[in-house]
Amino acid sequence: MELSDRVKKWLKNIAFYSSVAVGSLALISYANNETRFIEKNLGKAMVWCDENGFFTTSGYLWDQIRAYNTLENIVLNGTGESTTSSGFLLPSATAIQEFPKSTGKNITILDEENRSLATIRSTHESYSLEEFPPFLKSTIIVKEDRRFLKHYGVSWTALARAFAKDIMSMSRKQGGSTITMQVAKHFYKRKGANYSRSIFRKSKEILTAIELERLYTKKELFEFYMNNICEFGNRVVGFGDAAEFYFNKSLEDLTKAEMTFLAVIPNNPAQHPYRSSGIKTIRSNQERLLEQLVKAEKLTEEERSQIIEETESFRFKRKTNIIQSEYTYIVDVINQRLLQALEQEKIPTDELNLIDKDALVRQAGNAQIYTTLNLDLMRDLKRIVDSRGLGSSQDFAYIVIGADNGEIKAVYTSTGLGENSTLNWRMQTGSSFVKPLVYGFAFKHDKLRYDSELDDRFAANIVSDDKGLGVTFAIDDTTAWTVHNSTEDFFQGRQPWHQHLANSNNIIAAKLIQDLHNGNKTGPTMVMEVVSLLGTDLSRYGTRDDIYSSVLGTFEQTPLEVAYGFAVFDEGRIIMNPTNIHSLLIKNINILGKEFEVQNGAEYKQVLDEEDIPYLQTAMWTALRVGGYHAFGKTGTSQQIYTIHGKKTNSTWYNVFMRTKKHGDIVLTCFATGDDKVGRYGAEVHGKIVKEAVRKWAVYDNHYANLEHKLLEEPERIDVALEPEPVEITGDIETVLNNYLSLNRGFFTESKSRFLRNKTLKIEGDLYRQLAAVSSELGYESRKKYMNAINSLYKGVSVRSFPLLKDVGDVMTGLREAEQLQRRQGSTDSINIVRKYIRREVARYR
């Protein structure tokens, strides 16, 4: 059965080739050898038919030209229509003279000073024939068509020889095509990367090749072949692009080994260097080519050996895309704004998508996008963040905007091309933005004065739960809201408002938002209005006006929205819907020579009183702790846990305002997911980044250091904005302490230390409140020392002295220092009584 099939196949090839090919071609070749009658006369007839519209503008090359024309129509006319001329049988050979337009320039993204940030390589670049190295040109001639300069498009002898070999091998592998015929082949339709191999198709290619030789010079045909016909896999076309793609070199810098290596790839582009099998195939074909070059006296044997040795050292690292930039993560952000801007111009955008490799704009190229980004800031930001060393599993987004005009100046994200950019991730923002905003509202609506002092112990009823001490606010008759400060500092006591803001006191912020009212607007309503104007979707909350937790950053916002929100602390105003204003990133666009200027539609809304801004800035400057640098900031940490990449994490934030010499006033917003090793708090994750950025960019003018003395000095008249509520046990502190003893409630409770087998001492919750009340009689500095000591007792201290644990001795030292500080300002009786009492009670545990 196998023999029968083989015979049938052999007979079929004999009938097909021998009768038509060998005999006919041999006769044609003999008769035509001297006169070139066929090429000359048939060529004239072909040109006449083409000029008179008998041939069609269809086929592979015409499809590429049409893609360019379609893109041109989209850009210029707002329509994607591009027509195909009618005709029959053959494609028009005039495509070559039309083709150079479609091999245009790359897509370039430029910064505000017209410096390149990213280049998206178009399908390919064209080079003049003179730019190709002489050795490469002679190599291709030897390999593909030694009689290229002598024939008129078709080598009849080569065709007859190829057909004869096909007959003998019973296959259709030998083409016998000249360089001109290979060009002609690309005028016809193909499926994927393959062309039809039928005798009818080959006959049409011969006719087209003859016409090409009449229309174009050998130089023009060879140049077109080197630029547009040779394919190298990975969507790379032309030797110039192949040199850059595989060797990162220009044509003139290629070695002979690299030239001969590339020269054999077009025979089988699917076997490219990124495949292990491809390397073997290429090297095998290269060695055969080297033998041909030695025989043709284009190489010596010594050069051949050197080339083989050099080729063995070739290593290829796969390129995942054709975007050339250190900042590929900006392409997604720019692409989103670009498409939105073009839609406003009523231009169809399906074929203008920068990250769609099949879009026409990626094939034709020739586009420049001018942005507001700054290359220097981009470079600095990336270096500073990279030097911090975030965790490998951490996602992040860092963005710099102009504080006054909202223009995006720099971006650095962890997301790759085509992924959902972390700039668009929505997460809770902690204390980084809304908390200082509420302080601003409190000033605006007379709930705070510049000399106000606040006491978190009397903001609401104190409660004790698994998070420690906190307070509970009554939202209504049935709803309560419990708020805690950080576990390291349950209460901060009575302090000026700016200290509470600098220390990010949750309880004070909660009290302020609950007290805020302006007509029918509540504190949460004021916050929601601003957050909505920034672009945050709050539709799930409906018309609710009681989202008091928003002051702690429970609304989920993107880093972009947070950056624009924090800019309110520049002049008290925000840009409305900034994420929909494309001019804040893209200034203008040039596609195929047509310019589109992106209009600046920014509208501002004043949300805080401008006279309050210096006070808020100075308070946040004290929190930033950057000395004389002109900068202030606010950290934030979400309590909400998110599952990302299969791991549970939270969000960390740091917003910073800086005055710079070169870039004006800017806002840096830092966002990252938490990490067990790097940290889960905003200051831990971003602190080093912020400090280095401030030192790099901010001016050193002692601006806030000077303002601090004027604005935040301890006031002569104290206004306690939050009055203490009545306590259950009244009387002087000595009576209170004796009452505790007589009731046998115990001064301390005992528990085992986690680290040492030793007793630790803790204050009971009720007594803590009584002891903390003493601080209301103290001056500012002594109050801090006193409350630190009392807070330490609440958390628990060791009876004995250990290097890594707070002990009773530390508490007593703190109380003595508080007493010494208070002695300058007034009575020390209360502290003295507390200190003696603690010393007496602790003695029985030693």
Image (cartoon, helix red, strand yellow):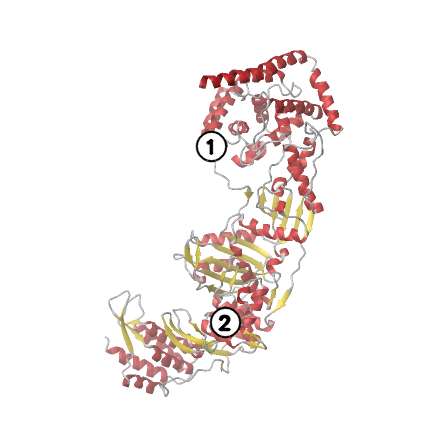
Q: First in sequence: mark 2 or mark 1?
A: 1
Residue drawn at (61%, 58%) of the image = 580
Residue drawn at (66%, 42%) of the image = 71
Q: Position of residue 158 (x, y in %)?
A: 59, 17
Amino acid type, residue under disc 1 in the picture: Phe
Q: Position of residue 113 (x, y in %)?
A: 62, 51
Q: Is residue 772 left or right of residue 546?
A: left
Q: Is residue 93 above or below residue 167?
A: below
Quadrant including the C terminus: bottom left
SS at circle 2: helix
Q: Which residue is mark 2?
A: 548
SS at circle 1: loop
Q: Position of residue 578 (x, y in %)?
A: 60, 60
Q: Which residue is mark 1?
A: 314
The CA distance from mark 2 to mark 1 is: 64 Å
Q: Is residue 412 above or below residue 255?
A: below
**Location of residue 440 (image quadrant):** bottom right
